[in-house]
Structures are given as C-alpha cells and as structure tokens.
Amino acid sequence: GAGVSQSPSNKVTEKGKDVELRCDPISGHTALYWYRQSLGQGLEFLIYFQGNSAPDKSGLPSDRFSAERTGGSVSTLTIQRTQQEDSAVYLCASSLKYEQYFGPGTRLTVT
Amino acid sequence: SQQGEEDPQALSIQEGENATMNCSYKTSINNLQWYRQNSGRGLVHLILIRSNEREKHSGRLRVTLDTSKKSSSLLITASRAADTASYFCATSNAGGTSYGKLTFGQGTILTVHP
C-alpha cells in the first residue's frame, strides 16, 4: 500500500512569507506526527495528533507554527512569517501504535 | 531538546565487520526504537524493544536495553555497504497520554566501505 506522502518535497520562500506543508498519512493510521530536522538541532518533535484527542503541541517552537488534521487524515503544518531559522527538513509520520512510518520530508529554505 | 545521546557520532568500518552503536537516555521509558535514515530524508523503523525486555533480534540486528543504566545498543552483524546510513535511537516516555511521541537521539553516521 501507499506510504506516507508529503508535499511539496522542496519549498523555497522569502523571509516573512507564510508556508503550508502537507502530509498524507497511511490510511487507517490513527496517530500523526510532525518533526523538524536541522543540522544544529537534530530531530525535534513538533506536534502529535492521536485520534479525536486534543493534539500534543508541546514541541511547537513558537506561535508562528500551527497544524491541523482534517477528518482524521490529511494534516497541514503552517508556518507564518517565516524566519531563516525555520529552514529545515520537516518530516511527517503516522502510526497505529508505536512503530512510526515516515514520509520523505519537505525541505524548507527561507531566504 | 534531545533526550538521547548516541555514540559514536560517526563510525567507519569495512564490509563484513560488525557495527555497534550506543544510545543513552534520561527519563523512564515505555519503549526504545531504532530508526535508519538515508540521504537526510525519511526514516525507516528497524526495531522496537520494550522497557521490560533486555535483548531483541531481527535478522542481522541485535538490540540490548539496560534500563538501570538508561542505555541501549544496536549491533549490526556482517555489515554491508548498503547499511551505510544514519541510525537514530528514539524513546517513548512512560506515563501520560502521549505514549506515541518519540524523543530522538542525535544519531550515528555509519559508513561501510566495500
């Protein structure tokens, strides 16, 4: 079956612009996660959706970051007023329980 | 912030040799997982070991867990050039409702020379 997909694969944006990153999880997976990977910070947890529960937003670095998961499936991570330090690879994963399946990531470059 | 620390940061070996990577963590865990990453993009799950397990095998992989020392090791036996990748440990913390949330280590870059 299809794995986790993310779009776009690469995004270059100007400082101050808003960006939206999309994640399509594996069908039937109840949990969805966003992570950020950058050279200086390694892999950082951002946000976690589990079923109909309130999302765990404890990893979001600032209020410029937000995420939604519509209909328990597709998720969008939005970064408002992007800054150069937001440049990173944004990874999405989904799971049924503990083992997480990752998408290929979106490489975001803020110029 | 990263809970796990991995060592070595980089490991270079010849094909056929064994590779051992270590991971330490700080809090009580539900389980510990190892992931592999090629080319800085998506991660692939390798193996999961629960907090009440001490050792687990999967093919050429062997994972150990010592909860008293808060450490784990990943052994890849008879390495191949195709094993060249970054390897990350990740922990799921005990308690709470966010049991699926993972905290990753900094990773070990493994290079296997043909």
Image: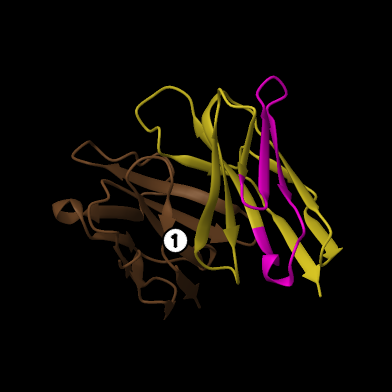
Magenta-drawn segment:
B58-86
Q: Is residue A25 magenta?
A: no
| Chain B drawn colour | yellow
| Chain A drawn colour | brown
- In the rendered structure, the answer to whether residue B32 lies left or right of residue A59 reads right
Which residue sits at x=21%, y=56%?
A73
Residue A51 locus on image (x, y percent): 22, 41
In depth, the one of B34 and A65 nearer the eye is B34
Q: How is the image coloured?
A: by chain
Residue B28 locus on image (x, y percent): 56, 23
Q: Residue furthest left?
A: A71
Which residue sits at x=52%, y=50%?
A44
- In the rendered structure, the answer to whether residue B21 lies left or right of residue B102 reads right
- In the rendered structure, the answer to whether residue B10 lies left or right of residue B54 reads right
Q: Residue furthest front?
A: B59
Res. A13 visible in picture = no
Q: Is residue B65 magenta?
A: yes
In depth, the one of A41 and A94 nearer the eye is A94
The residue that disc 1 covers is: A91
Which amino acid is tagged 1?
Leu
Which residue sits at x=42%, y=40%?
A98
Q: Examine the rendered structure and indicate whether residue A106 appears above or below residue A45.
A: below
Residue B104 locus on image (x, y percent): 57, 45
Examine the image and state in which quarter residue A104 appears. bottom left
